[in-house]
Amino acid sequence: MPVLEIPETTFKPSNIPIQEQYNGKIVFSNEQLTKENSTEDKFKSSFEVGTPVYARIFIPNQVGNYMLYSNLNCNVPCDQDASKNINDEYTLNYYIDDSLMLSQVLTNNSAAGLDGVQTWQRIIYAPSLSSFDWSSNNTRERLNNLSPGSHNVKAVIWAGNKKRYGVSHIPIAEGEFDLTMSGSSKIKIGETWSTSKSGSMDSDARLKATLVELSSEELKANYSDLTIKEYKVLSNDYSIQKEYNYPKFRYVQVAAYCINKSGKCFVCYLLFVICYLLRVYSNNFYKWGNTNKEEVDCE
């Protein structure tokens, strides 16, 4: 694989023993690849769908230096100070069976302050987390709709925003693995009703009943295909200031666990404004803003 080469720089290199051997490559594992455990016995080239996939990227230089060289054609050693080298943006594309599945523009920032400028980790898929590269609905749906059998997944990195800057067409790192689709295993979202935002319900039973009733009316009017299973209040601050001469307001968020006719599960978030007068809430409850609906893994 051709790797984009640039003039030698003087910044401190990575201290991972296998760095030089794997420069220009992306390796994969079913466990987190820290600097300390990035050894060849951890690397894998095939995964079952639904199992964790972690990646470690090795490049022989700094993302900012690739940007400087690609855009300004420097023919002398690039500045070792990344802050002077334009930026540390890079483009990470995932391809499934040679078809583009996902394109992301990310910021290295010296590997987000975690690892270093030449090697860093990315979480491709981790069922226990809600933030990973394959967490978007479109990517998840596409993967889950793949035919049974083995599929090739390729990850390719370019320095900079590939669309905006038009940097060199030669990538700075790439790697690939086989993903096997079998049985009922799926790419999950990583968020459930139980793990979604939590809050304590006010002890006032009338307040609780009113909020649930208003939420139910709102959801039925706007999401007729949803069946509501459970509610919880996410705001636990109901304390009211002691001034008596004008109303006070509190914002209260209500979460509802819902299932649609296709069997998909969602958490719907509704925000209400409660008007208080003389430290006692009146019958004035106002729906505030739009209802947000987020898909979660069913429990």
Image (tube, rainbow, N blue to C red):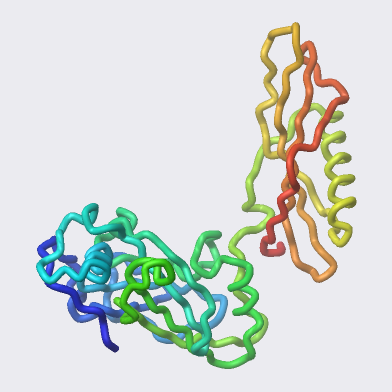
* Residue 36 visible, this orientation: no
* Residue 295 visible, this orientation: yes
156 up-or-down from 223: above or below: below
Question: Residue at left 34%, top 69%?
Answer: 33
211 up-or-down from 297: above or below: above
Question: Residue at left 81%, top 21%?
Answer: 281
* Residue in the foreground of this view, choosing between 252 and 182: 252
Question: Residue at left 25%, top 73%?
Answer: 59
241 up-or-down from 93: above or below: above
**Residue 92 in the image: x percent, y percent?**
42, 72
- Of all residues, the one furthest to the bottom in this rendering is 149
- Of all residues, the one furthest to the front in this rendering is 72
Q: Is residue 88 left or right of residue 128?
A: left
Kindly indicate the quadrant of the structure image that contains residue 111: bottom left
**Residue 70 in the image: x percent, y percent?**
26, 71
**Residue 184 in the image: x percent, y percent?**
67, 81
Q: Is residue 55 left or right of residue 292?
A: left
**Residue 273 in the image: x percent, y percent?**
76, 31
268 up-or-down from 187: above or below: above
Question: Residue at left 51%, top 85%?
Answer: 179
Kindly indicate the quadrant of the structure image that contains residue 158: bottom left
Count of picture labels: 0
